[in-house]
Image: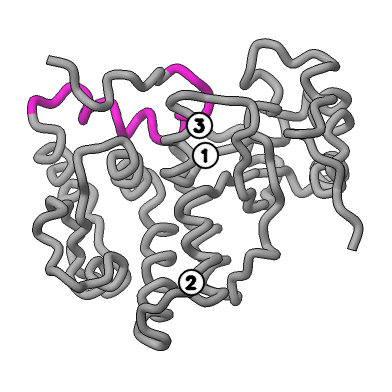
Amino acid sequence: MTRFFDEIDWPQAWFAAVRESADSLLAAEDWRSQLNHLALEAGLSNHLELPLRFITQEELPEGTAYEAHISATGLVPTRENLHDFFNALVWLTFPAIKRQLNALQAAQIAALGIGKSRGPARDAATIFDENAALLVLADTPEGADLIAALRAHAWQDAFVRQADKFGGCAEVWCFGHALMEKLVKPYKAITAHTWVVMVEPAYFKLDASARRAHIDGVVAAQLASQVLTTADYTPLPVLGIPGWWPQQDAAFYQDQQVFRVKRRN
């Protein structure tokens, strides 16, 4: 029997962050039961220290906001589809960031209610939750040069001239579950809202699990200490990341429909 997640091409680089969390779910007869087992085993909880559990969408009370429900109960409504499957994997992989995002969203709902507009802070948190990529850079002149090129939309500079920095003093973890859902069937124009994290060069000598745990703590602390706005993000056409797509020749990066020139204010 074909399952909804059987179409995912797991070796692709953009699934690296959640691949380890996915392994046991893919092998389980009941992925949702295994998901809750992993959450219990890891001691996951929400920002109110309520144990985190994944429930069916039908168990969400009618008229209750999704984020508010997670905040008040620790129960995450999870449908049997790619979008919610990736969301659950991100909870397992980056639990501290997810806790903090839920805290931000729930606080905004409590303050402003549910209306036609989310408001700037909740909007920024939702964008992070859905479409963020975590760009980790060494806090060195080399890392500074790369982020300067990306922020200037100097794509040839960032992705061609500085290509060897990716893996050595720069890496990208996909975080947003909607972003990963889109990448199940990748197309060139997919663009992430990138959150930049500067780290000590020794970070890149850690194994993948230790790097993820470090980033989880650092980013959660950043989100807790500042007012989040959409101005905090840097656009990143993810298939431009060196090694993430097979045909990254000069013409690939010259496509201004994807690799757009930075607009002047």
In front of the other: label 2 or label 3? 2
Instruction: Give the distance between the C-alpha atoms of the residues marked 2 and 3, in whole angstroms.
Output: 33 Å
Q: Mostly what secondary structure, the magenta segment?
A: helix
- Indicate the secondary structure of the residue bearing disc 2: helix
Q: Quadrant of the C terminus?
A: bottom right
The amino acid type, in three-letter code, at marker 2 is Arg
- Mark 2 highlights which residue? 122
x and y percent of residue 132 in the render?
55, 49
Count numbered badges in the picture: 3
Task: State the residue at coordinates (25%, 66%).
Answer: 70
Examine the rendered structure and indicate whether residue 58 appears above or below residue 161.
below
- Mark 1 highlights which residue? 174
The magenta segment: 11-29
The amino acid type, in three-letter code, at marker 3 is Asp
The amino acid type, in three-letter code, at marker 1 is Cys
Please rate how many residues cluster around mark 3, counting C-alpha atoms within 10 Å: few if below 14, some from 14 to 19, many from 20: few
x and y percent of residue 177 in the render?
41, 44
Please rate how many residues cluster around mark 2, counting C-alpha atoms within 10 Å: few if below 14, some from 14 to 19, many from 20: many
x and y percent of residue 109 in the render?
37, 79
- Residue 81 lies left or right of residue 14; in this view the side is left
Task: State the residue at coordinates (36%, 54%).
Answer: 95
Please rate how many residues cluster around mark 1, counting C-alpha atoms within 10 Å: few if below 14, some from 14 to 19, many from 20: many
- Mark 3 highlights which residue? 207
Upstream in sequence: badge 3 or badge 1: 1
> Please, which residue is most extreme toward the bottom here?
111
Examine the rendered structure and indicate whether residue 145 appears above or below residue 75.
above
Upstream in sequence: badge 2 or badge 3: 2
Q: Would you say residue 130 sits in the magenta stretch?
A: no
